[in-house]
Image (cartoon, helix red, strand yellow):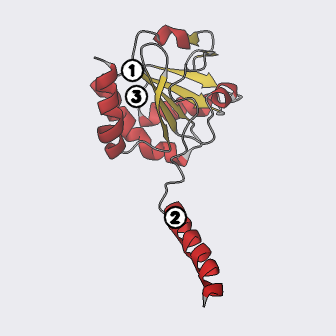
Amino acid sequence: MNRYLLPLGVFIVLLVFLGIGLNLNPRDVPSPLVGKAAPEFNLPKLENPAEIFVQKEMLGKVWLLNVWASWCSACREEHPLLVEFGKSGVVPIIGLDYKDNRIDGMRWLSGMGNPYETVAFDEDGRVGINYGVYGVPETYLIDRQGVIRYKQTGPITPEILRDKIMPMVKELQK
């Protein structure tokens, strides 16, 4: 009888770990950048490549950096919410058009609305790499000192905006 207790105990422990693992959200990958300075970048703007967006210009502001692309179906899902949220003017939203075609990106915004204060064009994805982007959409909440306070992997939903992002924005804007 005792010889079955050890394998049974190991089996029960494995079942507990399996149960915990199955209840985790695979999109909740913690970012090592949360709590650290946002990587600096200068990129041409999507609408006008002669103009450069300099990330340092956002120092002193609480802002969102939304990484998106016209080829991204999940971006299509969150975009109407961003358009509505952008109209509120609560916080500036900067777009980072990631590994996209400039014409397709501009066509996307003219057809679906533009929630962004400006859009930086990351054609080769180098800035995205510095931010640890592994899929779009991803959104970063950045404080006045340029520190990343929150990262949303995947589309922002009304619940995430209401329950996670807005309380943090209000706290950071105090």
- The numbered mark, 1 or 3, whose residue comes first in the sequence reads 1
Horizontal arrangement in the rendering, residue 4 relative to residue 24 (left or right): right
Secondary structure of residue under mark 1: loop
- Which comes before the other along the chain, label 3 or label 2? 2
Whether residue 90 is visible to the viewer of this picture, yes or no, is: no
Q: Which label lies toward us, 1 or 3?
A: 1
Tag 1: Cα neighbours inside 10 Å, few (<14), some, or many (≥20)? Answer: many
Is residue 83 left or right of 149 when viewed as pictured?
left
Residue displayed at 50% across by 62% down = 20
The image shows residue 153, relative to residue 9, as above or below, that is: above
What residue is drawn where x is 39% and y is 18%? 62
Disc 1 target residue: 92
Q: Quadrant of the N terminus?
A: bottom right
| Quadrant of residue 112 within the rendered picture | top left
- Report which residue position mark 2 lands on: 22
Instruction: Give the CA separation, mark 1 to mark 3.
Output: 9 Å
Q: Amino acid at mark 1?
A: Pro
* Circle nearer the N terminus (1, 2): 2
Q: Check the image and report above or below for 146 versus 16.
A: above
Q: Position of residue 109 (x, y in %)?
A: 48, 31
Residue at image position (28%, 25%) is 170
Name the residue beneath numbered marker 3: 115
Mark 3 is on which residue type? Pro
x and y percentages locating residue 47 in the rendered image: 55, 19
Q: Which quarter shows the C terminus?
A: top left
> How far separated are the C-alphas under marks 1 and 2?
36 Å
